[in-house]
Image (cartoon, rainbow, N blue to C red):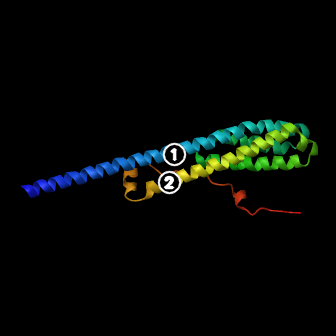
Amino acid sequence: MTTVAGFLIALAALALLIVLWVIATYNRLVSLRNQVENAWSQIDVQLRRRFDLVPNLVETVKGYAAHEKEIFEKVAEARARMMQAQSVPEQAEANNLLTSALKSLFAVAEAYPDLKANQNFLSLQNELANTEQQIARAREVYNDAVMMMNTMVQVFPASLVAGWFGFRTKDYFPVEEEAREPVKVSF
């Protein structure tokens, strides 16, 4: 009987260890999912801040460059797409369009010395630059959290727990293609 009792105790201890491991793995997955969601909300805050700055910037530039209608339309269209985007890939694409449109807007501003000296424009430009830096930092944090979550969801044996409880991999926030191209410097 002691052999059977010992075997049952060992089996119960093994079952308890497996249950504890499943609980710990589940809790880790929940923690990682929450980190990803928090990191995304930080990106969203910065994108909204940027979104709110853009109309002020456009109105300031419009006063100096009223004939640059196409650029203002591109900025407005990109801003509208940001509002409609729901998923991470959609928001990333809309963000890239807005970045491109803003680059065009700043290129136009370069042609107007009075605008470049305008305090309101300079203030908006600095605030937008600060926001862009915060978006880049938030994107790094988000992508790091996604990497940790995706790794946990994909590695064995944690993938078993992830599958049982419906945890899925998350999408990265990609960098725009223009940022991958070499910087062009001309003198």
In the displayed structure, 56 sits above or below 21; it is: above
What is the distance, in whole Å, between disc 2 and disc 1 at their CAs?
A: 9 Å
Residue with the mark numbered 2: 148
Q: Position of residue 55 (x, y in %)?
A: 77, 36
Residue under the image location 67 percent in, 46 percent down: 134
Residue 59 - label: none
Q: Position of residue 182 (x, y in %)?
A: 75, 64
Q: State the quadrant of the C terminus.
A: bottom right
The answer to whether one can see residue 67 in this image is no
Residue that mark 1 sits on: 35
- Judged left or right of residue 20, residue 79 is right
Tell me which amino acid carries mark 2.
Answer: Met
Mark 1 neighbour class, 10 Å CA radius: few under 14, some 14 to 19, many 20 or more: some
Residue 130: quarter of image = top right
The residue under the point 26% across, 49% down is 16
* Helix, strand or loop at mark 2: helix
Residue 8 picture location, percent across and down: 15, 53
Q: Choose top left, top right, bottom left or bottom right for residue 73.
A: top right
Is any part of residue 77 visible from this angle?
yes
Q: Is residue 100 rendered to the left or right of residue 155?
A: right
Q: Amino acid at mark 1?
A: Gln
Mark 2 and mark 1 in contact? Answer it, CB < 8 Å: yes
20 to 120, vertically: above or below: below
> In which quadrant of the rendered image does the N terminus lie?
bottom left
Dot 2: within a 10 Å radius of its alpha carbon, few (fewer than 14), some, or many (20 or more) residues? Answer: some
Identify which residue is drawn at 85% across, 42% down.
69
Q: So how many labels did they put on this image?
A: 2
> Along the horizontal axis of the image, is 78 left or right of 163?
right
Extreme residue in the left direction = 1
Q: Residue 88, how many percent across, how many down?
A: 59, 47
Q: Is residue 171 left or right of residue 158?
A: right
**In the depicted view, which residue is nearer to us: 66 or 110?**
110
